[in-house]
Image (spheres, rainbow, N blue to C red):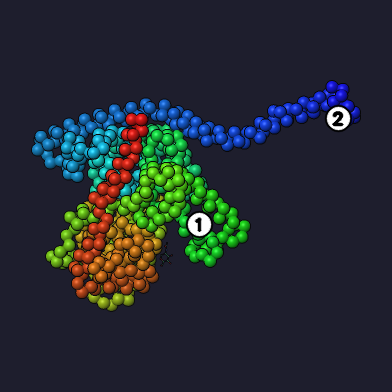
Amino acid sequence: MADTCAGNGASTCSAQKTLSFMDSRFLSHVALPILCLTPLATLLLFPLLWRAAGAFLGWYLRKKTDGRRCHILELVEAEEKKYRESRRSSTSSGGAGEDGGWEKLDAYTAGTARNGEEGDDDWDGIVGFFHPFCNAGGGGERVLWAAIRATQQRWPKAKCVVYTGDHGVTKDAILARVKNRFNIHLHPPTINFLYLSTRHWVLASTWPRFTLAGQSLGSLILAWDAFSLLVPDIFVDTMGYAFALGLSKFLFPAVPTGAYVHYPTISTDMLDSLGPGSQGVNAGQGAGLRGTVKRLYWRLFARVYSRVGASADVVMTNSTWTQGHIQRLWGPLRSRKAAGAAQPIAVVYPPVAVSELEHEVEVSPATESKREKVLLYIAQFRPEKNHTLILQSFADFLKKSGSEAAQGAKLVLVGSVRDDSDSKRVYQLRLMVNELHIRDRVEFHLDASWPEILEWLRRASVGVNGMWNEHFGIGVVEYQAAGLVAVVHDSGGPKVDIVVDVEGEPTGFHATTASEFAEGFEKALSLPNPYAVRQRARQSAKRFTEEEFARRWTEQMEKLVTVRMGKKRA
Ligand SMILES: *[C@@H]1O[C@H](CO)[C@@H](O)[C@H](O)[C@H]1NC(C)=O
Ligand SMILES: *[C@@H]1O[C@H](CO)[C@@H](O)[C@H](O)[C@H]1NC(C)=O
């Protein structure tokens, strides 16, 4: 000891020396190796720990929700029985089943189901649909309900569960609205609703700054909320919450996941738009410190978004436009992950009630006389639908056009009102109508039922759409299916995909400014042979039928069911 002390210099006290001696040995033999190895070990262990944490949490959630699962299965069985009995008694008493649309499914359940090659017709698991705003009544909801109907028809024994935040709306009320608004008849016993209590976390208003990241974090909370209610056998997100899919994979690797993407949360356009010499809303914002931070934030977000999105087993997009963007973001990781086995991203066009409209709305020389000079605009009262532009154009049209076309012409606005701000907007539109002195020429029909909408599609001559850069425009397809001459914004899907020439002849008109719209109205109402244009419009709409949607949806779902059945057997 003394030797070492001397060797280390005499001025320090021996106690310290002992310590420093210990330190150096400790350092070289124990601490250093540990210090060097820890990052390496962490690096190696982390994925394992991460997976273990996921598995543990997943196990915890399964345990927690097992009771509810049993309860739901019992409920379905009981309701199925009741449903059958009530139907039997109504048929035996001679009452015609009012659920005409459901006959087909009953035939399935009665044992005439096709004998699928894969033998999965009897699959009776639970499909969880993540759609927190299921009662909103928009195009996204139509996709949800049509998807559920297609699933019910293909797998009559499967149970569909919708995770929604629409509290205080009962199952009966939701199904009644689905029937009323979309004319979609679901089989009530096998569908159930689970109510989420944390929906406010995904509202943009909750996250005034860093909205993208905030809402995504919110969707994680919401998805956790969902899984604390029930762990499904297959998990499908129909609202674009990619983070919910990522969480599902983290917690339940054996649960196959599917995504139906309407719109990428961050688009490659956005990422590019900050660059020098770019155009668009964010042009020029890439400069300076702010720009750098923003760019970093978006890049980082896009990374994480791609990662969680790529975890989905099956991905569908509602249009070619969306497919292109999702492919660029998720594609690279997807193909790497599954070693080339990843399913290609499929385009599944949203269903439009084309066949039903063809059936309900007659287009013939005889019905020409029943058409009135009605310009019909069917759209939710959202700001981007730009009702003010249409009102202004209509006023211009009436004022400028001394022609016959404007005589007795009417503008009919049909749309759903989702909340207070929609109501406020309608109020302001009514004020505007007064100011423009066109009160007796404009009608509002709020929350119109499907029969009412059909009636307007029969009476109207022209279908209007004022939204800039709409990526598709289901409403415009509906106009065409009903034989209306379209006057639509000269941008987006209505321009590129929908209101296109058929056999080299136009099916409608494109416009941007109020005066162009006014001109469009004038032209549409003074066509020499409107019937010919109506026939072409109808032809054009055939590309977007419900049957086509159901066919494509089922094709993708079959992949998920196959994976699920394989996992169960394994
Ligand atoms: C409505 O259209 C006008 C004219 O094209 C445009 O200036 C305005 O920004 C649009 N409003 C919205 C909310 O898109
Ligand atoms: C896809 O969804 C987006 C967002 O809801 C919508 O703007 C677009 O029109 C949809 N595309 C189709 C083909 O319906």
Name of the residue lying farthest toward the bottom: 402
Residue type at numbered disc 2: Asn
User: In the rendered structure, which disc, 2 or 1, sits on the residue that comes first in sequence?
Assistant: 2
Q: Which residue occupies the foreground of this view, 412 or 332?
A: 332
Report the side of 208 relative to 449 (left or right).
right
Report the side of 469 relative to 368 (left or right).
right
Q: Quadrant of the N terminus?
A: top right
Q: Quadrant of the C terminus?
A: top left
Q: Quadrant of residue 75?
A: top left
Residue at x-position 50% and y-position 46%: 304
Name of the residue lying farthest toward the right: 11
x, y percent for residue 393: 35, 69
x, y percent for residue 516: 35, 72
Q: Which residue occupies the foreground of this view, 327 or 208?
A: 327
Q: Where is mark 1, residue-wise?
A: 271
Q: Quadrant of residue 486?
A: bottom left
Q: Where is mark 2, residue-wise?
A: 8
Residue type at numbered disc 1: Leu
Against 299, residue 520 (above or below) is below
Mark sitting on residue 165: none
x, y percent for residue 45: 55, 33
Against 133, residue 120 (above or below) is above
Residue at x-position 23% and y-position 73%: 527
x, y percent for residue 237: 38, 43
Q: Quadrant of residue 440?
A: bottom left
Q: Residues within 10 Å of mark 2 (few under 14, many from 20)?
A: few
Distance CA(mark 2)–CA(mark 1): 61 Å
